[in-house]
């Protein structure tokens, strides 16, 4: 089946957390699909470099430095748009892998802030513009951690469950409006930063996550599923897409070759 060509009113796609990993890969793929991409992240230098790369390749891309947890800044950002077609809520991440008994409440708070309230902030701020496009798509990049727990994951798992609930509830609440809500839940994805951030920059601990796993997903694999879901015809709503590497049967069942 051929991908739907974005309509004139739906051509802007905002991607949060676009400075690296899944966000950057998604921005690239949506630009390829014909969207005018707006890259947001805290690290201005990175999104500016990516916007330049995309523009040089003949795409339309702009960069806007944004911390999704800063509601005032998010509201100001949203004033730039009368209509947008797509919002990809990708900003977020994991901090720590401690058991509940010893987990750091501050890390739990920060994960809730970025993953859940960040998604809430940007979605609330841009919902009028998505609705005004008469063909809007909200993507929530959650995680398989939003659907089942694992030992040492509770803080992240709790935040991702909340993000999943946000997506599900929003879909119920706005049914009948011209906006669909798509949740993409990736499993094990090897990106340059996810595990490194989780383990506070400890490269050895980060590498252990993927130890012996033949082919963890890449950021491109996930971006591919996002771009596929977003480019389905408007009446098709991919509610939830769970994507894992073949070697991962569940959050706790991973095949390792050594
Ligand atoms: C990433 C998946 O297994 O590290 O969102 O929680 S996991």
Image: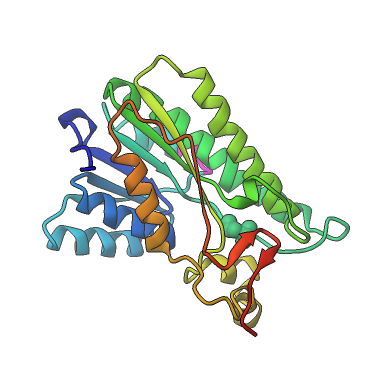
Residue sitting at x 60%, y 64%: 248
For the N terminus, which image quadrant?
Answer: top left
In the image, 125: left or right of 170?
Answer: left
Name the chief secondary structure element in magenta. helix
The residue positioned 59% from the left and 75% from the top of the image is 210
Residue sitting farthest toward the front: 1
Q: Residue 215's x, y, as percent?
A: 49, 73
Residue 137 image-quadrant placement: top left
Q: How many marks?
A: 0
The residue sitting at 54% across, 46% down in the picture is 142
Reply yes or no: does residue 72 show up in magenta. Answer: yes
Q: Mark yes or no: residue 20 visible.
A: no
Q: Is residue 34 left or right of residue 143?
A: left
- In the image, 208 versus 96, the foreground residue is 208
Res. 141 visible in picture: yes
x and y, in percent, of residue 181 in the image: 44, 31
What's drawn in magenta, residue-wise? Answer: 69-73
Residue found farthest to the right? 101
Q: Position of residue 198 (x, y in %)?
A: 63, 65
Q: Which corner quadrant of the figure contains ligand 1?
A: bottom right
Residue 202 higher or lower than 4, as above or below: below
State yes or no: residue 55 in magenta. Answer: no
Q: How is the image coloured?
A: rainbow
Q: Quadrant of the C terminus?
A: bottom right
Q: Nearer the viewer, residue 255 or 82?
A: 255
Give the residue displayed 57% in from the left and 46% down from the top: 115
Residue in the foreground of this view, choosing between 37 and 229: 229
- For this orientation, the residue located farthest to the bottom is 258
Q: Is residue 191 left or right of residue 220?
A: right
């Amino acid at each position: 089946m051929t991908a739907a060509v974005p309509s004139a009113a739906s051509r802007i796609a905002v991607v949060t957390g676009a400075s690296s990993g899944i966000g950057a890969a998604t921005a690239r793929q949506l630009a390829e699909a014909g969207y005018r991409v707006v890259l947001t992240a805290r690290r201005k230098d990175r999104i500016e470099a990516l916007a330049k790369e995309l523009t040089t390749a003949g795409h339309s891309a702009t960069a806007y430095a944004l911390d999704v947890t800063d509601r005032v800044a998010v509201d100001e950002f949203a004033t730039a748009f009368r209509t947008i077609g797509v919002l990809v809520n990708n900003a977020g991440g994991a901090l720590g892998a401690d058991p509940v008994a010893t987990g750091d409440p501050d890390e739990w708070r920060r994960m809730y802030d970025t993953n859940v309230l960040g998604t809430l902030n940007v979605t609330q701020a841009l919902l009028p513009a998505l609705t005004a496009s008469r063909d809007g798509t909200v993507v929530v990049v959650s995680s398989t951690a939003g659907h089942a727990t694992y030992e040492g994951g509770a803080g992240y798992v709790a935040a991702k469950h909340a993000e999943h609930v946000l997506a599900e509830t929003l879909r119920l609440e706005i049914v009948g409006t011209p906006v669909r809500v798509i949740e993409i839940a990736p499993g094990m994805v090897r990106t340059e930063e996810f595990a490194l951030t989780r383990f506070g920059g400890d490269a050895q601990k980060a590498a252990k996550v993927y130890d012996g796993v033949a082919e963890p997903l890449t950021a491109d694999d996930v971006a591919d599923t996002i771009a596929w879901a977003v480019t389905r015809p408007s009446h098709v709503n991919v509610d939830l897409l769970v994507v894992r590497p073949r070697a991962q049967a569940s959050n706790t069942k991973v095949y390792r070759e050594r």
